[in-house]
Amino acid sequence: MQQPVTMSVDNNGIIRINFFGDLLAGQVPAFQSAIQAGRDFVKSTFEKSGKKVKILLDMTKFSGNYNAEALRILSEFAAGNKDYVYRTASFGGSDKVKTAGEIATLLSGRENIKIFNTEDEAFVWLQE
């Protein structure tokens, strides 16, 4: 089964987080585990570089089907890494995906998260 989230650091030092499939009740345990690993990944990347990190969320393969628990986990992830993140940009996905992103952003209390239509737009904003 495909993991709901994968993470990596690209050649520009940007943490890339890719979302896949659904985030419904059956996927929540794997999502919770991946997000916990993500917290550690973001913090260790920050500690290694000594600079706040940039995060790029790729939602192009996320179905937009999620439950409230998954949204809570995502918003807590965003809130919990605010001390380590310069900016987070999300791109791709349906209007439903973008609405979920806006809700998670509001719940996180972060003001340095933006949602874009394309990867190019998101990348340019991260580099500002």
Image: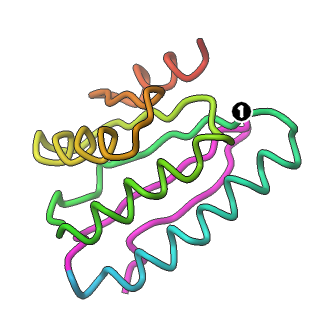
Position of residue 9 in the picture relative to residue 123 (left or right): right
Q: Quadrant of the N terminus?
A: bottom left
Residue found at the very far left of the displayed protein: 96
- Whole-percent x, y for residue 85 in the image: 63, 37
Query: Does 73 appear above or below 88?
Result: below
Q: Quadrant of residue 72?
A: bottom left
Q: Quadrant of residue 101?
A: top left
Query: Does 110 appear above or below 26?
Result: above
| Figure coloring | rainbow
Which range is magenta?
A: 1-24
Viewer-side residue, 80 vs 93: 80
The residue at the point 38 percent across, 85 percent down is 29
Q: Is residue 18 magenta?
A: yes
Q: Quadrant of residue 25?
A: bottom left
Position of residue 86 in the picture relative to residue 115 (left or right): right
Amino acid at dot 1: Asn
Viewer-side residue, 120 vs 90: 90
- Whole-percent x, y for residue 9 in the image: 68, 49
Question: Which residue is label 1 attached to?
Answer: 12
The residue at the point 30 percent across, 38 percent down is 106
Query: Which SS class for mark 1?
Result: loop
- Whole-percent x, y for residue 94 in the image: 14, 43
Position of residue 29 in the picture relative to residue 94 (left or right): right
The residue at the point 56 percent across, 40 percent down is 55
Mostly what secondary structure, the magenta segment?
strand
Q: Is residue 23 magenta?
A: yes
Viewer-side residue, 12 vs 83: 83
The residue at the point 67 percent across, 53 percent down is 42
Mark 1 burial class by Cα count in 10 Å: few <14, some 14-19, many 20+: few
Q: Quadrant of the C terminus?
A: top right
